[in-house]
Amino acid sequence: MAKVVRGARITGAQREKLAAQYVKKYESGQSIRQIADKAGRSYGFVHGVLVESGIALRGRGGATRGTTKRARATG
């Protein structure tokens, strides 16, 4: 994936090409943060491009607050 100048506006065909690359990587299991780091773009930019592309984003990973307490109370 070619790095883009940080802060440069990405529009038109170039944005569509990036979106296709990001979608492919995201669907292969990479996180938004991993894609952003490798591309030299911000998390927000990559997230926005993925949302624009219409892809369904995965839920957050890792434990969430309260999970352990509920597990103890029911288990």
Image (cartoon, rainbow, N blue to C red):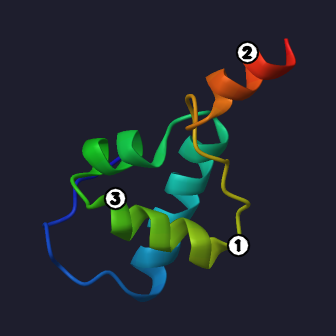
- 23 over 31 or under it: above or below: below
Of callouts 1 and 3, the N-terminal one: 3
Visible in this render: residue 17? no
State yes or no: discs 1 and 3 in contact (Cβ < 8 Å).
no
Name which quarter of the figure residue 54 lies in: bottom right
Query: Helix, strand or loop at disc 1?
Result: loop
Q: Which residue is mark 1?
A: 54
Query: Helix, strand or loop at disc 2?
Result: helix
The residue shown at (21%, 53%) is: 40
- Callout 1: 10 Å neighbours few (<14), some, many (20+)? few
Query: Helix, strand or loop at disc 3?
Result: helix
- 74 over 22 or under it: above or below: above
The residue shown at (56%, 66%) is: 50
Percent from the top left, x then y, of residue 14? 40, 76
Q: Which residue is mark 3?
A: 43
Q: Amino acid at mark 3?
A: Tyr
Percent from the top left, x then y, of residue 45? 36, 69
Q: Amino acid at mark 2?
A: Arg
**Residue at mark 3 to residue at mark 2: CA–CA distance:** 35 Å
Q: Nearer the viewer, mark 1 or mark 3?
A: 3
- 71 over 21 or under it: above or below: above
Q: Amino acid at mark 1?
A: Gly
The residue shown at (60%, 55%) is: 23
Outermost residue to the top? 75
Of callouts 3 and 2, the N-terminal one: 3
- Callout 3: 10 Å neighbours few (<14), some, many (20+)? some
Q: Which mark is residue 66?
A: none
The residue shown at (41%, 63%) is: 46
In the figure, is residue 64 to the left or right of 46?
right
Q: Which residue is mark 2?
A: 72
- Quadrant the C terminus occupies: top right
